[in-house]
Amino acid sequence: MHRRTLLATAAASALPFGAAQAQTTDYPTRAVTMTVAFPPGGQADIVARPVAAALERIWRQPVPVVNRGGAGGAIGNAAVARAQPDGYTLLMALSSLAMLPEADRINGRPPSYTVDQLAPIALITADPTVLVVKADAPWRTLEDLVADAKRRPGAITYSSAGNYSTLHVAMAMFTGAADIDMLHVPYAGGGPAMTALLSGTVHALSSGPGPALSQVRDGKLRALAQWGATRAPGFEDVPTFKEKGYDDVEFYIWAGVFAPAGTPAPIQQKLRDSLRQAVEQEQTKTALAAAGSPVDFRVGDAFERFFREDSARLVRAVQRIGKVD
């Protein structure tokens, strides 16, 4: 009886390992959807598309990028948080991922998702946002903009990807530090926010470097300042807020891949390995560098520590903003 019990226990314990090994070996056997929680044209979309194309080459399976915009990213984030944890639904998230549930709590709403419903897989890029205005705007320097905003409180507008989005929080950091009042105009994503600026509907935008760089190079936009500790590639002539005396104005818009919590560990590991291969491909590095978002790849403890520390800082920033009517 004892021997039969031991054999049965051994057989049972071997099954999950064997199943996990099979999952790792076979995965993926069909299309893997990469969700972007914003409309096309924003930072997450710009990073997701070359990464998805590289994964298709590695896996020989389709990796469609699906844009599910709305509520500053909360709709798409929540959809992935609730998805089947089988590795076939991924999220290319931005740093707003941790801010949105806190914003819901501040405004008396139940969060549409929580961070612990998602498993961090890999950081792909981490770039400072850039303050841009139209090339024909009257402000040629940051000082010009600040002086005008002090003269005309609430008259200068800026767009964002939605309330409490990365682009909103970055601007709130700046306007608070400069003690100026600029009118916030939220949109459904970074792409529409950029379109609003280019069309002249709003006056300014805190943009991810990817969407901004081509517009600056084409002479459509002018960059006044950037949120990094040091000057970012492609924006070497643009001063940082720290250089201008705003010591606490520092913000990074990062893009990283997440899976639903509960995704089997072997699949998570295969995702990390595949994403490492993806960002090492020349096509991927070239595409991201050209977009102004060079690769900053981190996995495992390095990404989890980065995510935890950055999330805590951003949650505090949202708490300072408080309730938004």
Image: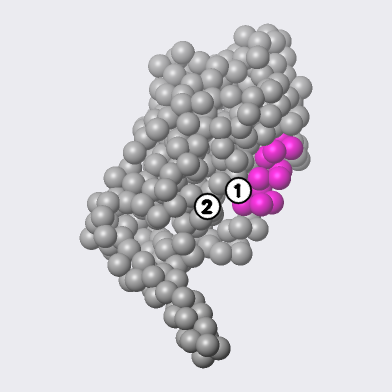
Residue 144 is marked as none
Q: Residues within 10 Å of mark 2 (few under 14, many from 20)?
A: some
Of 272 and 8, nearer the camera is 8
Instruction: Using residue 55 as the reference point, say whether residue 119 is left or right of it.
Output: right
Residue at figure coordinates x 65%, y 58% from the top left: 305
- Taking the image as shown, residue 37 lies to the left or right of residue 168, namely left
Q: CA distance from mark 1 to mark 2?
A: 7 Å
Q: Nearer the viewer, residue 300 or 229?
A: 300
Mark 2: amino acid = Ala
- Tell me which secondary structure the magenta stretch mostly adopts: helix
Residue 293 drawn in magenta: no
Image point 47% across, 81% down: which residue? 8
Q: Residues within 10 Å of mark 1 (few under 14, many from 20)?
A: few
Provide the secondary structure element on which disc 1 rests.
Answer: helix
Which labelled disc corresponds to residue 116? 1
Q: Which residue is mark 2?
A: 261
Is the Cβ of the residue at disc 1 closer than 8 Å to that at disc 2? yes
Disc count in the image?
A: 2
Q: Which residues are magenta?
A: 307-317
Residue 183 lies, with reference to residue 67, above or below; the image says above
Q: Looking at the picture, which amino acid does disc 1 mark? A: Asp
In the rendered structure, the answer to whether residue 128 lies left or right of residue 174 reads: left
313 in magenta: yes
Is residue 294 among the parts visible in the rendering? no
